[in-house]
Amino acid sequence: MLSSIRNNWFSNVRGDLLAGIVVALALIPEAIAFSIIAGVDPKVGLYASFCIAVVIAFVGGRPGMISAATGAMALLMVTLVKEHGLEYLLAATLLTGVFQIIAGYLKLGALMRFVSRSVVTGFVNALAILIFMAQLPELTNVTWHVYAMTAAGLAIIYLFPLVPVVGKVLPSPLVCIISLTAVAMILGLDIRTVGDMGELPDTLPVFLWPDVPLNLETLMIILPYSLGLAVVGLLESMMTATIVDDLTDTTSDRNRECKGQGVANIGAGLLGGMAGCAMIGQSIINIKSGGRTRLSTFTAGAFLLVMVLVLDQWLVQIPMAALVAVMIMVSIGTFSWESIRNLREHPLSTNIVMVVTVIVVVATHNLAFGVLAGVLLAALFFANKVGHYMLVRSDYDEASDTRRYNVVGQVFFSSSEKFIESFDFKEAVDNVVIDLSRAHFWDITAVAALDKVVVKFRREGADVDVVGLNEASATIVDRFGVHDKPDAVERLMAH
């Protein structure tokens, strides 16, 4: 128990504390921006980010991953807030948490195994593009000072780690934010700051139950939004967990993470915050700044609240150019540049899945749509590929006037047509043996194909013997097949 707590919380204290501070600084403008997207007060996003980060540090299944208010979730809330107001958003946030906890208990985190590597790569690349695109409003119609500050920020981020000793101790994004804030204050530059994003809250969040009628009508209003938020939240969280697993060469407990996201969202809803989920950008900032354990996530949430309440007069001075530089670094670091090089080497189907995932996510700004499109395409390509690995060989025994067909491979909806076309029904033979000892029947489409083959041969006057079915195939054929049921065969032949 103690060793587990030490490993999960205190095995990397300095790195986690510094990384948590960097993440907290980067969370502030994002939380405010996402609140504005959703159409709510900035404190709704800030309270949500504080609460979700602190709670998930204790109950989440992926140490070192950052969860807070996110743009993907904010986009789904716009209509609900516009039509029904904040209280219904808080109620939807609570229901979102309940759905996510149920998903955890149903072990739906295991469904991530159906998401191929090409879908994850496409998802990551799309997110990198969206993160970069989100910075463009801060870089359009601005003075040259903003471009100079952003360029200086990027230079600090990439060059500071090369400085002996100190470069290894302090995270360069933190140095970038502090340095540019000091320069802007000393020179009195008239550029956009965090203070221009919106008013920061000046009180601690308080417990409140959403002021909505507890009836079926309310449930019908919030249900579709809660389901959408739960699905998108879990998808982004599971994807982020996969990426952090790769970056840290560790594993995560996905079902625990599903439950943790649910508990964190319920906590956020009860403290006046909006629903959130894991953030790929902030998680990468955390990992690249040296964060590894739950302490970094807790520090990010706790320090966010401390800064907003205690250091607000300093926070409002942070130039947006400094944070833009950090987020550009995140987008560059998030994008899988290797995937561009791999376009020549990887199969066409893999490349199509990756590119379609990117296009759908960027076009719709909805991560769930992109992942769904990618998973469906990958499944279709896989089914098509496996369907080709089915062949039927035959040999003829003149003495007994028997044609023996040997079926090899997987028979299912994709290969059933090829299976039927492999038999010669016009050949005049007395006996037909269909040997299925090296084949496997997967679905009722395959069973229907076998029925069709047997019935067609019998219609031509041949005796048909089906042999060699393995146990699993025999079970599905016995249950759904009709070729050995006289009444059913007559009905089938009548069509």
Image (cartoon, helix red, strand yellow):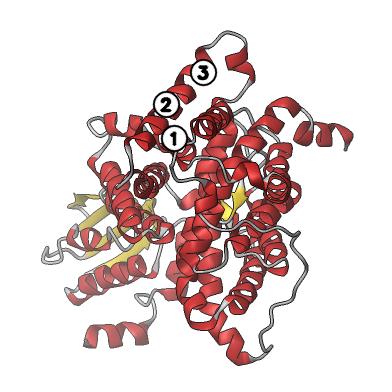
Q: Is residue 274 left or right of residue 51?
A: left
Q: Secondary structure at mark 3?
A: helix
Numbered tag placed on residue 325 in the rendering: 1
Instruction: List x then y, in percent, for residue 295.
Output: 74, 38
Farthest top residue?
164
At x 35% / y 55%, what residue is drawn? 361
Q: Earlier in the sequence, mark 1 or mark 3?
A: 3
- 144 shown above or below 57: above
The answer to whether one can see residue 258 in this image is: no
**What crowding class fits label 1: few (fewer than 14 Cα within 10 Å), some (14-19), or many (20 or more)?**
many
Q: Give me the residue at 39% from left, 80% from top.
A: 485
Residue labelled with disc 3: 160
Contact (CB < 8 A) between labels 2 and 1?
yes
Q: Which residue is mark 2?
A: 152
Q: CA distance from mark 1 to mark 3?
A: 14 Å
Q: Amino acid at mark 3?
A: Phe
State the SS at label 1: helix
Amino acid on which the number 1 mark rests in the picture? Ala
Tell me the residue at 59%/35% (across/down).
Answer: 286
Image height of 311 relative to 75, above or below: above
